[in-house]
Amino acid sequence: GENVEQHPSTLSVQEGDSAVIKCTYSDSASNYFPWYKQELGKRPQLIIDIRSNVGEKKDQRIAVTLNKTAKHFSLHITETQPEDSAVYFCAEGSIYNQGGKLIFGQGTELSVKP
Amino acid sequence: DADVTQTPRNRITKTGKRIMLECSQTKGHDRMYWYRQDPGLGLRLIYYSFDVKDINKGEISDGYSVSRQAQAKFSLSLESAIPNQTALYFCATSDLQLGTDTQYFGPGTRLTVL
């Protein structure tokens, strides 16, 4: 069945360092992999997404990489800042053929220390 | 994002009571979802609806039911609440567009079952 494993569950870094969060999925039919950020007391919000026909996508300090063969995808945050502190969720889904349901990972609590 | 609203925002109830959580959206999206969030377990899908006549079970639908009263409204009911249904509940909407499927979350409802 559909399942997403996310690691680590908690991550603490110094301001300016990089942070990497990794996810593994099981459904070979999945072709859409978004990442959501949830600040304390707030709702989750999309920060970046990638489709299966792309290996890497960047948006300023954040990037996502996808390895379809290994069924891994990762979020990379460079030059971390205190405002990056939040819970990050990966997800898998399908955006074709009437898809749209997402399965989320367990979340990673990122703490950026000044 | 005031386009997706949830009522109530907080609710304390007793075991065995029937509870309804409501979600409304002004985004004009066809797709709506209900998730629950528990620490360490991420966001788990309860039910989802791709249009007014479509209702689908998610990962953890037991003990829950839903009603899609209109395109803009999607309600979640707990027929007989139990303590392990204590959680933060999120409603979300999306409008599947080619290449992406951003989900827009409501502010959440914190439910406590005593």
Image (spheres, rainbow, N blue to C red):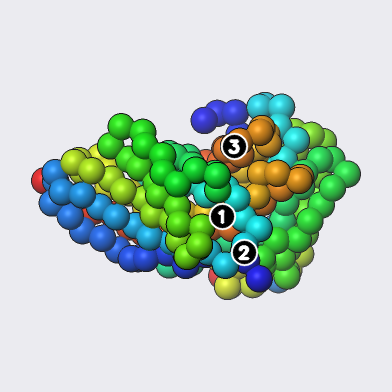
Amino acid residing under circle 3 = Thr
Q: Are marks 3 and 2 on the same chain?
A: no
Residue denoted by label 1 = A92
Separation of marks 3 and 2 at Cα, in angstroms: 18 Å
Neighbours of disc 3 within 10 Å: few (<14), some (14-19), many (20+):
some
Q: Contact (CB < 8 A) between labels 1 and 2?
A: yes
- Name the chain letter of the residue that bears numbered label 1: A
- Name the chain letter of the residue that bears numbered label 3: B
The image shows residue B80 at horizontal and vertical percentages of: 73, 68
Q: Are marks 3 and 1 on the same chain?
A: no
Amino acid residing under circle 1 = Glu
**For this view, does A24 lie left or right of residue A29?**
left
Q: Which residue corresponds to the image point at 73% horizontal and 70% vertical from the top-left?
A: B62
**Of helix, strand and loop, which one carries label 2?**
loop
Between disc 1 and disc 2, whose residue precedes?
A: 2
* B55 or B18, nearer to the observer: B55
Residue denoted by label 2 = A27
Residue denoted by label 3 = B100
Amino acid residing under circle 2 = Asp
Which residue reaches farthest right? B53
